[in-house]
Image: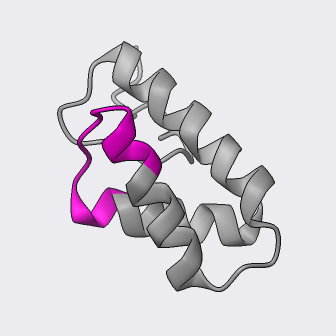
Amino acid sequence: MSDQQPAEDSAPELDESSASDVDAIAGIAVEVRDTAGASHADDIEAMLRRRLAESSVEVSEDDVQNLVQQIREGD
């Protein structure tokens, strides 16, 4: 057997999030991406934070920044 580690996913790891939270976060990110268009990063971040708060989903500051970057890049 090989001692190699499995390849890591390109998706960000979300700190201590349950599967349902991950699904909710993914859905929110898609909504924000579809709404934001070519908005400035600050506007995207504000939309993302508002939607996360409305959904009572908590993510770390690093995860918010990663999601903003992914939304801006279209990932």
Res. 35 image quadrant: bottom right
Quadrant where the N terminus sits is: top left
* Residue 31 place in picture, x, y as percent: 68, 43
* Residue 19 place in picture, x, y as percent: 37, 15
Kindly identify the residue that appears in the image at 73 percent across and 70 percent down.
Answer: 73
**Extent of the magenta region:** 51-63
Q: Is residue 10 above or below residue 46?
A: above
Q: Which one is nearer the viewer's eye here, 38 or 1?
A: 38
Q: Which one is nearer the viewer's eye here, 49 or 64?
A: 49
**Would residue 41 be visible to someone looking at this image?**
yes
Magenta stretch: includes residue 40: no
Q: Which one is nearer the viewer's eye here, 46 or 62?
A: 46
Quadrant where the C terminus sits is: bottom right
Q: Is residue 12 above or below residue 41?
A: above
28 left or right of 61 in image: right
Kindly identify the residue that appears in the image at 48 percent across and 57 percent down.
Answer: 48
